[in-house]
Amino acid sequence: MTGKELKKALQHIDTNRQPFLKWWRKENDFADIELVTEFLQGLDPALEFGGYELLDMEQMWALVKQQSPKTVNRDERRREEVILWDHPSRDGQPQQVCPFTAQSLLTIFNVETKGNLLC
């Protein structure tokens, strides 16, 4: 499938319900996960893709938790759901408290996987 075909398939996706796109190359040797909105902004219509899968927040949380079972947990603070991430912050704190958002999940996932995701 080309980037043009993929863009057409994603045009009517509810990104509030499924904000993540897992895509892989035709060679099926590499996969990446991005926010759908950001993926579409930089999409080259001529690129070839092997396939894709849409993920919701809970599916992405499961991937983050699977990748880093000892360093991430969910909690509630001030009636808001947060992610407790045992990862030194810029100010040296051993644990970061991140909002439970699509961007936070993707950032944690990318740091924990070092950007390497195999199919």
Image (spheres, grey):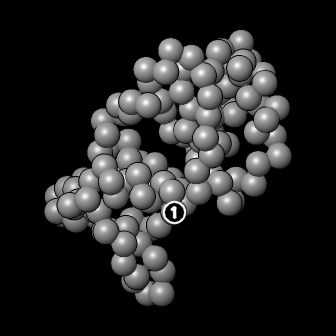
**Residue 28 placed where, x, y %?**
49, 21
- Tag 1: residue type? Glu
Q: Quadrant of the N terminus?
A: top right
* Figure quadrant of residue 74: bottom left
Image: 47 above or below 80? above
From where the camera sits, is residue 104 visible? no
**Residue 110 placed where, x, y %?**
38, 42
| Residue occupying the far bottom of the picture | 79
**Residue 118 placed where, x, y %?**
39, 30
Residue shown at 62% from the left, 28% from the top: 51
Left or right: where 90 falls relative to 31:
left
Image: 83 above or below 18? below
Q: Quadrant of the C terminus?
A: top left
Q: For this rendering, which residue is in front, 85 or 9?
A: 9
Crowding at dot 1, Cα within 10 Å, few <14 / some 14-19 / many 20+, comes out as: few
Image: 44 above or below 70? above
**Residue 88 placed where, x, y %?**
20, 56
Left or right: where 93 falls relative to 109:
left
Q: For this rendering, which residue is in front, 30 or 46?
A: 30
Residue shown at 56% from the left, 32% from the top: 23
